[in-house]
Image (spheres, rainbow, N blue to C red):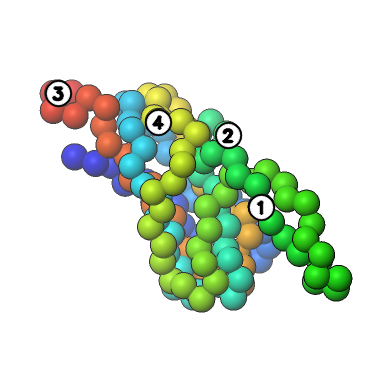
Amino acid sequence: MNKFLVFHYHETIGNQAHMAPAYYMDADYELVAARIYAANAPLRDAKFDILKDGVSIFSNRTTRAWNKVTGVEITGVDATDIQLTAGQNSEELLMDFNTSMIEESSWVSAMVVDAGGGKNFSVQLELKPMSEGEDD
């Protein structure tokens, strides 16, 4: 049976906020999917990260941004976040994970990178036991 880790953050006063709770892994798990839900949809893309022992589980990607005054593209920076699209209440993400598994005795946590003006976020990580079918 798959395991679901759920992280929640009700109000966002600022960015870079840790979501509760953090989970201690009791076995090895394969990553399946990540999902995001917001009761109040963000006004701009909301960004989140899920960490295993303090390191993102998502692959690096280069972000693109534009200078609002000049309209010129700003050189991108590496980011590892997942996003909830502006105006949307939920997303399911079968992402490019930078690892295929979460090892036993790892700590898994999540954080709000940028709330995008949204509120009441839940981030879910679905995991499949590596030893499925065996008795524990």
The image position of residue 72, as x and y in percent, is: 82, 65
Residue 90 picture quarter: bottom left
Asked whether the beta carbons under mark 2 and mark 4 sit within 8 Å of each other, the answer is no
Q: Amino acid at mark 2?
A: Gly
The image position of residue 32, as x and y in percent, is: 33, 42
Give the mark toward the camera: 3 or 1. 1
Asked whether the beta carbons under mark 1 and mark 2 sit within 8 Å of each other, the answer is no
Residue 12 picture quarter: bottom right
Q: CA distance from mark 1 to mark 2?
A: 21 Å
Residue 1 picture quarter: top left
- Numbered disc 1: secondary structure: loop
Disc with the residue nearer the chain's start (3 vs 4): 4
Q: Residue at x 63, y 60 (%)?
A: 114
Q: CA distance from mark 2 to mark 4?
A: 16 Å
Question: Mark 3 = which residue?
Answer: 134
Question: Mark 1 = which residue?
Answer: 63
Disc with the residue nearer the chain's start (3 vs 1): 1
Q: Amino acid at mark 4?
A: Ser
Give the mark toward the camera: 3 or 4. 4
Whether residue 50 can be seen here? yes
Characterize the local packing of mark 1: few (<14), some (14-19) or many (20 or more) Cα atoms within 10 angstroms: few
Q: Which mark is residue 100?
A: 4
Q: Residue at x 59, y 75 (%)?
A: 43
- Numbered disc 3: secondary structure: loop
Characterize the local packing of mark 3: few (<14), some (14-19) or many (20 or more) Cα atoms within 10 angstroms: few
The image position of residue 85, as x and y in percent, is: 52, 67
